[in-house]
Image: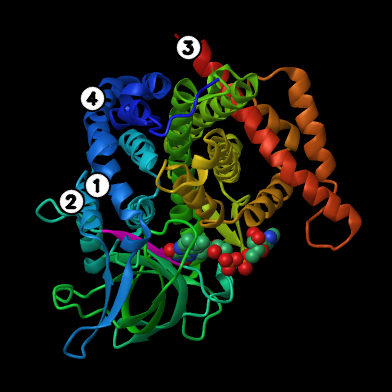
């Protein structure tokens, strides 16, 4: 009960004081434990690096991220300078330029930066949400992996060297431009034209979703003139010496999109009119390479970044539960709230554990996923002369990356929503917590690098194609190793039942029902995988 008080003394200060002082990594005992568990001899070094890195992310970059996220600070386009020169300058707040330089200055792609360092740093960094830096970082990762495999000309080798080593401590930013107005999922339908003119490839046409449009380089898909097959190129956004003069490499930025999420990041529509481009890999393997290398890294990275966002959300609502009262009780004294906190916690822990397990398998695979391109579909080649066991392992990892991407991207949004609900009306206030931003950015994660429906279909196609040499029963047994026999049998039987449908392209009641069941099955299957990873983590000392 309370009497009126015209000087209402209520204050959020104790909660805010705690929040201001949280060091993301120091507080995260579960992540620390898994880092030790999974990284062997590297663990001590990683722990040291994480402690230094976390101090930057948790305080300086957190404050920058908050400042740049307000509507007044969104990037905008200045088409012309004061002397009628077309410049298409992307104007962004000063804080983001400083933060971007510092974040990229961590030399993410240098030879002596390990796979686990990238994993650990991205997880910590993404606790500030996308913030205009995570997307370009992820794109640069895919570009570096692509060039590591294919750079074989003076230009592409120089770009790779630049990505890895920077110049005077400044590292370049990468992007990836694939989607066109007629479709993002259907990459083979790309229309951007590549023409070889006097020994130089040039691009003509348009791209409709170009995030990190302020980048220094971009991976880009285009069809060579007269060909129906998509090829892959890298473009410098400015030719050498032109960045300072603001003379772009033969393209105009037509517009910056207005978006729901990742608003700090400029996503542009671009017209190419003679852009100089460098081919990467065989011209007839553009789709295989963009999906098999570039998008695979992005999909893994989206899961890592989503886990970071989920962790921060959980930490902040649990503390709010200790601080906030209603009807004379702390929120954490309501069983209803505790049930939600526990659900949220179980999702965060299973996500982190599953991420470590998938990533370890991925980085242990010799020469990556090694996809082939047959009949327009991407697939682990069954004509490969690799031992059968290795082919199976590749398929396990490939399917796990797809399952992880769709499941984690969706779960993180469900958990943001739960977190928002725990904060009550304050939950939707953009200036009260980072949860609304996490949710908006999370919605983008569900779409880019393969929207859910596309990946669900791809998973199904892959299982059907592999079943001759990799029966569903064996796949389920392999990925759920350690689960009880009944669970494995149930998942196997259900997979076999759904696979009675040969494909998902015939419009009838049976197929529609199977699609709906598949959507649900894939989440459950990956959750079962995550729960095994979690049990392994919990049972380790
Ligand atoms: C904020 C943001 C930033 C982006 N940045 C970039 C970028 O930098 N570079 C870039 O290249 N792209 C970018 N994209 C584009 C993104 O990758 C595409 O939106 C995505 O690939 C889907 O393409 P689409 O939007 O044309 O949808 P469509 O391909 O038209 O798909 C529409 C629906 O149909 C479903 N669908 C399509 N094909 C199939 C199928 N075979 N089976 C079942 N279902 C199917 C899809 O899942 C979806 O539900 C960005 C998107 C967003 C939202």
The answer as to whether callout 1 falls within 8 Å of ligand 1 is: no
Write down the quadrant of residue 521 in the picture: top right
Question: Which of marks 4 and 2 precedes in the sequence?
Answer: 4
Q: Residue at x 48, y 36 (%)?
A: 310
Does 301 sit above or below residue 163? above
Q: Residue at x 63, y 23 (%)?
A: 339
- Left or right of 241 on screen, residue 202: right
- Left or right of 424 on screen, residue 501: right
Question: How far from the left and from the top, in percent, is residue 441?
Answer: 47, 51
Please give the residue where the numbered disc 3 appears in the rendered image: 540
Q: Nearer the viewer, mark 2 or mark 3?
A: 3
Please give the residue where the numbered disc 1 appears in the rendered image: 103
Judging from the image, what secondary structure is the residue with disc 2 in? helix
User: Which of 139 and 426 lies nearest the eye of the viewer?
Assistant: 426
Please give the residue where the numbered disc 4 appears in the rendered image: 48
Q: CA distance from mark 2 to mark 3?
A: 38 Å
Question: Which of marks 3 and 2 precedes in the sequence?
Answer: 2
Please give the residue where the numbered disc 2 appears in the rendered image: 165
Q: CA distance from mark 3 to mark 1?
A: 33 Å
Question: Which of marks 1 and 3 precedes in the sequence?
Answer: 1
Q: Which region shows up in magenta?
A: 173-177
Q: Quadrant of the C terminus?
A: top left
Q: Is residue 243 visible?
A: yes
Question: Quadrant for ligand 1?
Answer: bottom right
Question: How far from the left and from the top, in percent, is residue 234?
Answer: 34, 68
Q: Are marks 3 and 4 in contact (CB under 8 Å)?
A: no
Judging from the image, what secondary structure is the residue with disc 4 in? helix
Q: Are marks 2 and 3 in contact (CB under 8 Å)?
A: no
Q: CA distance from mark 3 to mark 4?
A: 22 Å
């Amino acid at each position: 009960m309370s009497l009126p008080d015209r000087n209402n003394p209520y204050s959020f200060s104790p909660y805010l004081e705690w929040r201001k002082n949280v060091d993301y990594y120091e507080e995260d005992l579960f992540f620390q434990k898994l880092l030790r568990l999974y990284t062997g001899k590297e663990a001590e070094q990683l722990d040291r690096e994480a402690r230094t890195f976390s101090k930057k992310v948790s305080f300086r970059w957190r404050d920058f991220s908050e400042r740049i996220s307000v509507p007044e600070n969104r990037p905008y386009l200045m088409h012309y300078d004061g002397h009628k020169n077309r410049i298409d300058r992307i104007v962004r707040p000063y804080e983001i330029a400083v933060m971007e330089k510092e974040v990229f200055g961590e030399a993410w792609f240098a030879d002596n930066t390990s796979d686990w360092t990238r994993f650990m740093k991205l997880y910590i960094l993404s606790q500030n949400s996308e913030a205009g830096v995570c997307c370009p970082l992820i794109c640069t990762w895919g570009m570096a992996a692509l060039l590591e495999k294919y750079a074989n000309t003076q230009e592409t080798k120089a770009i790779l060297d630049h990505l890895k080593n920077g110049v005077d401590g400044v590292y370049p930013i990468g992007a990836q431009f694939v989607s066109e107005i007629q479709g993002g999922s259907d990459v083979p339908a790309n229309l951007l034209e590549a023409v070889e003119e006097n020994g130089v490839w040039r691009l003509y046409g348009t791209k409709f979703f170009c995030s990190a449009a302020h980048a220094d380089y971009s991976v880009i898909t285009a069809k060579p003139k007269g060909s129906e097959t998509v090829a892959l190129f890298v473009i410098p956004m400015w030719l050498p010496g032109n960045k300072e003069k603001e003379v772009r490499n033969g393209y105009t930025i037509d517009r910056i999109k207005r978006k729901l999420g990742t608003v700090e990041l400029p996503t542009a529509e671009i017209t190419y009119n003679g852009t100089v481009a460098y081919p990467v890999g065989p011209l007839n393997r553009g789709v295989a390479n963009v999906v098999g290398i570039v998008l695979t890294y992005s999909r893994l990275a989206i899961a890592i970044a989503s886990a970071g966002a989920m962790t921060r959300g959980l930490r902040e609502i649990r503390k709010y539960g200790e601080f906030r009262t209603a009807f004379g009780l702390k929120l954490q004294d309501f069983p209803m709230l505790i049930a939600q906190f526990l659900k949220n916690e179980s999702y965060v822990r299973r996500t982190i554990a599953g991420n470590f397990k998938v990533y370890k398998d991925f980085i242990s695979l010799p020469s990556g996923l090694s996809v082939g391109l047959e009949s327009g579909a991407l697939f682990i080649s069954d004509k490969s002369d690799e031992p059968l066991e290795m082919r199976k392992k590749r398929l396990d990892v490939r399917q796990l990356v797809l399952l992880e991407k769709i499941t984690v991207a969706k779960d993180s949004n469900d958990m943001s929503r739960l977190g928002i609900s725990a904060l009550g009306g304050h939950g939707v206030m953009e200036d009260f917590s980072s949860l609304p931003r996490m949710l908006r950015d999370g919605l983008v994660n569900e779409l880019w690098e393969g929207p859910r429906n596309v990946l669900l279909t791809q998973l199904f196609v892959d299982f059907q194609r592999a079943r001759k040499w990799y029966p569903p029963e064996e796949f389920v047994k392999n990925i759920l190793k350690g689960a009880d026999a009944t669970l494995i049998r149930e998942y196997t039987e259900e997979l076999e039942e759904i696979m009675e449908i040969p494909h998902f392209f015939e419009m009838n009641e049976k197929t529609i029902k199977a699609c709906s069941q598949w959507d649900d099955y894939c989440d459950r299957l990956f959750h079962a995988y995550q729960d095994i990873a979690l049990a392994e983590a919990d049972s380790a000392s």
